[in-house]
Amino acid sequence: MKRKPDLEELQLFVKHHYKSRKDFRKALGISQSHLYGILNGDVALGDKVLNRLEKECNKVGVKLESLLKVKPMPIGGINAEEIQVTLDRELIVSITSRDIIEKTGYKVEIVPYQG
């Protein structure tokens, strides 16, 4: 399954763990134009590149998911990127497929599907 990178996180990863974009590109075994497309958000990461990127992440103790956009959550026939609960414009809870962020003092429970 192809995944889009979180461009900001991926660029920080490259900056902190490689001497240059060229070194990163070589580590992934991709062409310069492929890397350009990825870093511009025009190209999604296929299985081969995801596997190579995961190996590079493991070398430096970074989770691959932190470099990727969140997976969509199918809710009511739409693919949602995020669920936000607000009260008078104040964010109480933000839920993505990656994490849950909640305001102190509020309880958020995930109820598993028991079909």
Image (cartoon, helix red, strand yellow):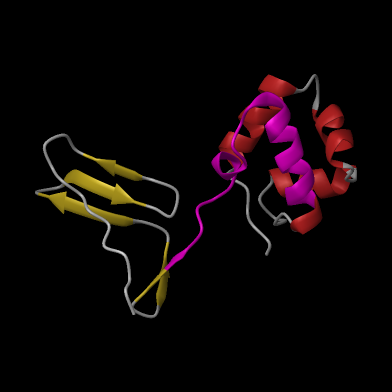
Q: Residue 37: in sight, yes or no?
A: no
Q: Residue 3: in sight, yes or no?
A: yes
Q: Is residue 59 magenta?
A: yes
Q: Position of residue 95 (x, y in %)?
A: 33, 52
Q: Quadrant of residue 25?
A: top right
Q: Nearer the viewer, residue 65 or 84?
A: 65
The residue that appears at 67% across and 20% down in the rendered structure is 16
The residue that appears at 80% across and 30% down in the rendered structure is 21
**Magenta residue span:** 49-73
Q: Position of residue 54 (x, y in %)?
A: 71, 42
Task: Give the quadrant of the C terminus.
Answer: bottom left
The residue that appears at 83% across and 40% down in the rendered structure is 28
**Taking 80 as reference, is 45 above or below it?**
above
Task: Give the quadrant of the N terminus.
Answer: bottom right
**Horizontal side, residue 62 vs residue 45: left or right:** left
Q: Position of residue 84 (x, y in %)?
A: 26, 54
**Horizontal side, residue 6 vs residue 98: left or right:** right
Q: Nearer the viewer, residue 3 or 61?
A: 61
**Taking 16 as reference, is 92 above or below it?**
below
